[in-house]
Amino acid sequence: MHLKSFALLGLLVAPLLMAGTAAARAETVSVAVAANFSDAAKAIGAAFKAKTGNDVAISSGATGALFTQISQGAPFQVFLSADSTTPKKAADGGFADASTDFTYAIGKIVLFSTDAALVTGPETLSASKFDKIAIADPKTAPYGAAAVAAMQKLGVYDALQPKIVTGTSIAQAYQFVDSKNAELGFVALSQVVNRKDGSQWVVPQEDYTPITQDAILLTPGKDSQAAKDFLAFLKSDDGTKVIESFGYAVGQ
């Protein structure tokens, strides 16, 4: 083969070798995500991949249920909780690095119905013109606990208890309302912020304890640069813009 042919072959092969090396360096970050933040996490994951080349694998569910999996050895590298206490609990249990804990979002609850005329404000709850109201399980889902607190603050919780249907997570509570199995429900603002149909009332922050959502690096991610980069991306301008676009506040 002539020297010129060798040179041409080198020009063709070099980009392939570089692409293969880049692909070999790419990682997949395994993230446990509170159900309310699932859609936002997918959008952040896509933006993170576009910037770094690293994939993000999302497993979503109620915060309490995710913690159970983490405590039983699930190989998640990052935990995006729906509260601030569960990540600290993970760190105390030796499942996470306490120094990496930070608030990535502040969630809001909203009373939502697919019926455009049903939700007009807090008076909707006392008028009681419905048979079922959906909430997330207050024992495992912070958004469910916030819903109970709001109803108690408004003085309607006892009267509404027979009408409450409970989802295992805020995702399931939303499904109950979206499928019309419940006429209305307390869901995360992020789940309906872009919906143009139905009716909704954003519950005032003073009616429930702020839903500060913390992120933390879990033990399986301690040696993963990609997992650490993902947490850094959450704090970046690119990350916070996505978070805010889903109806969350950032900072404290």
Image (tube, rainbow, N blue to C red):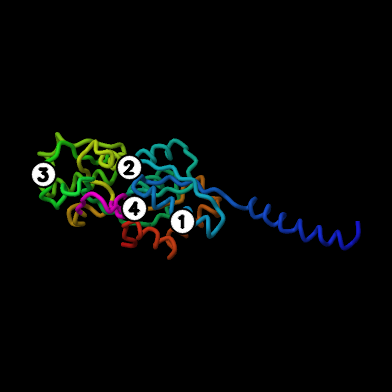
Q: Secondary structure at mark 2?
A: helix
User: In the image, which is nearer the foreground, mark 4 or mark 2?
Assistant: 2
User: In the image, which is nearer the foreground, mark 4 or mark 3?
Assistant: 3
Earlier sequence position, callout 4 versus callout 2: 2
Per the image, the residue denoted by label 3 is 156
Label 1 vs label 3: CA separation? 40 Å
State the quadrant of the N terminus.
bottom right
Q: Amino acid at mark 1?
A: Leu
Earlier sequence position, callout 2 versus callout 1: 2
Query: Which residue is most to the right?
Result: 2
Q: x, y percentage for residue 226?
A: 54, 54
Residue 213 — which label?
4
Q: Amino acid at mark 4?
A: Gln
State the quadrant of the C terminus.
bottom left
**For mark 1, does the 10 Å Cα neighbourhood hold few (<14), some (14 to 19), or many (20 or more) residues?**
many
Earlier sequence position, callout 3 versus callout 2: 3
Q: Nearer the viewer, residue 25 or 39?
A: 39
Label 4 vs label 3: CA separation? 27 Å
Residue drawn at 35 percent across, 46 percent down: 86
Earlier sequence position, callout 1 versus callout 3: 3
Per the image, the residue denoted by label 1 is 231
Q: x, y percentage for residue 209?
A: 22, 53
Label 2 vs label 1: CA separation? 23 Å
Per the image, the residue denoted by label 2 is 171
In this picture, which residue range is highlighted in magenta? 189-201
Badge 3 vs badge 2, beta-carbon distance below 8 Å: no
Image position of 8 (left or right of 109): right
Q: Amino acid at mark 2?
A: Ala
Label 1 vs label 4: CA separation? 13 Å
Whether 12 is drawn above or below 185: the answer is below
Query: Which residue is most to the top?
Result: 162
Earlier sequence position, callout 4 versus callout 3: 3
